[in-house]
Image (cartoon, rainbow, N blue to C red):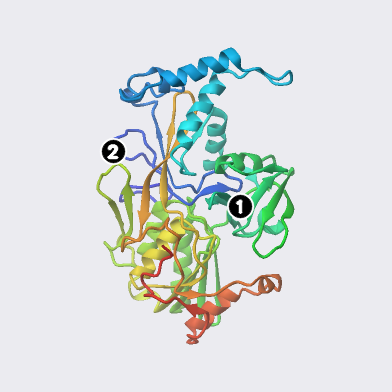
Amino acid sequence: MIKKEPGEQNNEIKLIEGNHPGRLMLGSGLAVLLAIAAFFSGLQIGSFADQEDLQTASLFSLFYSPKVVTEEADLKEFWKVWNLLDEKFAMSSSSEAITTEEKINGAIKGLVRTYGDPYTVYLPADDAAMFEDDISGNFSGVGMEVGMREGLITVISPLQNTPADKAGVKSGDKIVKIDGQSTENMSIDQAVRLIRGEANTTVTLTLYRKSEPDFIEIPVVRANINIPTVDTEIKDDVFIISLYSFNAVAEEKMQEAMQEYIDSGLTKLVLDLRGNPGGFLQSAVSIASYFLPAGKVVVQEGFGDGSEDKLYRSSSRSLGKNIPKEMVILIDGGSASASEILAGALREHGVATLMGDTTFGKGSVQELIALPSKASLKVTIARWFTPEGKSISEGGLNPDIFVKQEEKDTNANIDSQLEAAIEWLRGNKNVGATTKTSLLTDFAN
């Protein structure tokens, strides 16, 4: 998600003044697998290249520069192992010798992996270039997002009308093999690289699904992915806005949708965030501002370096008298990051009731740091909390009213969750199952 300073135009990417000049701030959902790698991964982009005091952070400086290696770091054993491998390792007749660059890349990846965070990743030059293509919107893939859950590569959400969606991939599916290769101990970014590919080529996913006794094999034909943003419709006396992603045009499209809502004269609103993996942080804050008075906390950002939490507050763009009298936000396991920020804020401020299923629970921010070698480091630098201080990462958000979308209904083209929301807004409060604790604070922790 791109963070913007007050007063910036909706769809501009701007540099932000701060401790690190030249930094471009992003934040968002998860490692996106459209396969678009990590476009929605909660990001902030920066570069070492323009900073004199960080010039030494090149591919090789981890081992050679006193500015990077601390006095306490004893690398004697590292170099001992390096030399022993050079002296003693017997290459097979079919394998090529490992280059120095490959060995250093492997060492850095191992260092990064010790932090145990699936969203903190070292990207060698080729992978970094692929990632840049992704965040620029130039990509082809299968149209789904993946994250890490219980150590397994998990489908967060297939995007609507993408190859993954049409092939039958579902939110919650565990990817156990990609083209026959096991995903055990595989990082999210490794999985992304395997699933991505040229349009009109096929990738075969082997999936574990709770409802199925055996693994499922699904071939998916890759395609150029166009991420949808907003749809609107009216059912009876209820206005429905489906927001599919918090991308660069989400604010503009939501502004148009909100104008449609005002022009309709209706007072009941459903905001559908199901399958929305997140996107730009500023979009979530701006959209929340339609429903909140100016100055209300939308999300708290806590940093790992001990610095003071940052609060993002609503701006003065409230709908005022046009704020819905009753509002339901639909969520599910594919709702992540910016979706969770928006849903959590509007619930805790008493504006909306959450209905559907538990969200994914991705509440961290990554900074993408470009290295002079053209490699990049994507590192988690902060975590998100709701206005009341609930961690978004710890189990996600439970809805106020649980409504399960049954597979039989999906197969019959029945949206039971949306129907329940409409019924609830029309006065039938007996739909679904309510949670046991406060509607404002029921999080799965």
Question: Any mark on residue 144, and which?
Answer: 1
At 61% across and 52% down in the image, what residue appears? 144
Question: Any mark on residue 228, and which?
Answer: none
Judging from the image, what secondary structure is the residue with disc 1 in?
A: strand
Mark 2, residue position: 18
At 31% across and 64% down in the image, what residue appears? 388
Quadrant position of residue 231 = bottom right
User: Badge 1, how many Cα within 10 Å: few under 14, some, many 20+?
Assistant: many
Left or right: where 350 falls relative to 223: left
Front residue of this view, candidates 445 and 178:
445
| Tag nearer the camera, 1 or 2 | 1
Q: Position of residue 245 (x, y in %)?
A: 51, 56
User: Badge 2, how many Cα within 10 Å: few under 14, some, many 20+?
Assistant: few
Front residue of this view, candidates 16 and 414:
414
Q: Tell me the quarter of the image containing the C terminus.
A: bottom left
Taking the view exactly as shown, the residue that stands out farthest to the top is 87
Amino acid on which the number 2 mark rests in the picture: Gly
At 71% across and 62% down in the image, what residue appears? 213
Contact (Cβ within 8 Å) of mark 1 with mark 2: no
Separation of marks 1 and 2 at Cα, in angstroms: 34 Å
Quadrant position of residue 251 = bottom left
